[in-house]
Amino acid sequence: MATITEIRRCGPGLRRRALVIDGDHWRDVPSGLIAIIAVDVADEVDLFELEERIRAAEPALARERAIRLITARERSCHGLVERLVDDGFARAVAEGASADLERIGLIDDDRYAHALARTLANARGAGRARITRELRQAGIAEELAAQALEEALDPDEERAAASRLAQAAAARPGATVDKIASRLLRRGYRSAVALAVAREAIGAADRADDSGAATSSAYDD
């Protein structure tokens, strides 16, 4: 028999519990599992039997946690698995929960990829590079990511969106080509696009200022 000497919070957001057995770290488990397997500090346990209790209880808890996570916001299959692993679930258990929810349509990478790409393009003004990067980080397959990107923001639309952002930025005091281009680069626009529309916006702003100054001078005369 072994003795549980500590149950310690750990992991991202302290969502996991580290089981310390006889002074040594044994393994991490999801926080919600502690009550289900009914263990506490100073308990005498058989490690094989404890492992079996964890294995029996973990899948149902993972599914319950997964449903709560996707109810809060939509996630990719990869994103859901990684969050469950961060919460302390074994990777195989997390992958099983994700696969189950994918099978019944509660998570869908195609739906997620297109929604994320549209949100980034339309609501956040992101360029193609940033959209591609975020789709990859979400674990979206390359071909699916490319389809979602083209639907949300093709190259011609990207230039038009960048131009609108550049014109708005050029109207601000102290605007320069470098500042506008840098702003666009941070949003994920290609450098060639960012520089071109920044120059156009500053040029248009300068011409508008010159026209306004000339009109003012004519009235003064």
Image: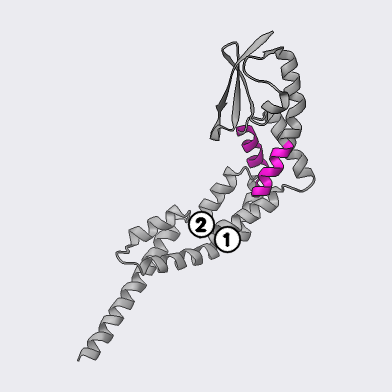
**Residue 7 seen from this side:** yes
Image quadrant where one finds the N terminus = top right
Up the image or down, 105 lies above or below 165; here it is: above
Tell me the kind of residue under disc 1.
Leu
Bin the neighbour count of mark 2 within 10 Å (Cα to Cα): few under 14, some 14-19, many 20 and up. Answer: many
Task: Report the front residue among 137 and 57.
Answer: 57
Instruction: List x then y, in percent, for residue 182.
Output: 38, 55
Residue with the mark numbered 1: 153
Q: Distance between the residues labelled 1 and 2?
A: 8 Å
**What residue sits 50% from the left and 65% below the top?**
161
Up the image or down, 137 lies above or below 119; here it is: above
Majority secondary structure in the magenta region: helix
- Where disc 2 sits, the SS reads loop
Left or right, 26 with respect to 203, comes to right
Up the image or down, 86 lies above or below 70; here it is: above
Tell me the kind of residue under disc 2.
Gly
Is disc 1 in contact with disc 2, using a CB cutoff of under 8 Å? yes
Task: Report the front residue among 181 and 50.
Answer: 50
Instruction: List x then y, in percent, for residue 193.
Output: 45, 60
**Which residue is farthest top?**
1
Task: Report the front residue among 97 and 163.
Answer: 97
Residue with the mark numbered 2: 127
Q: Which region is colored magenta?
A: 63-86
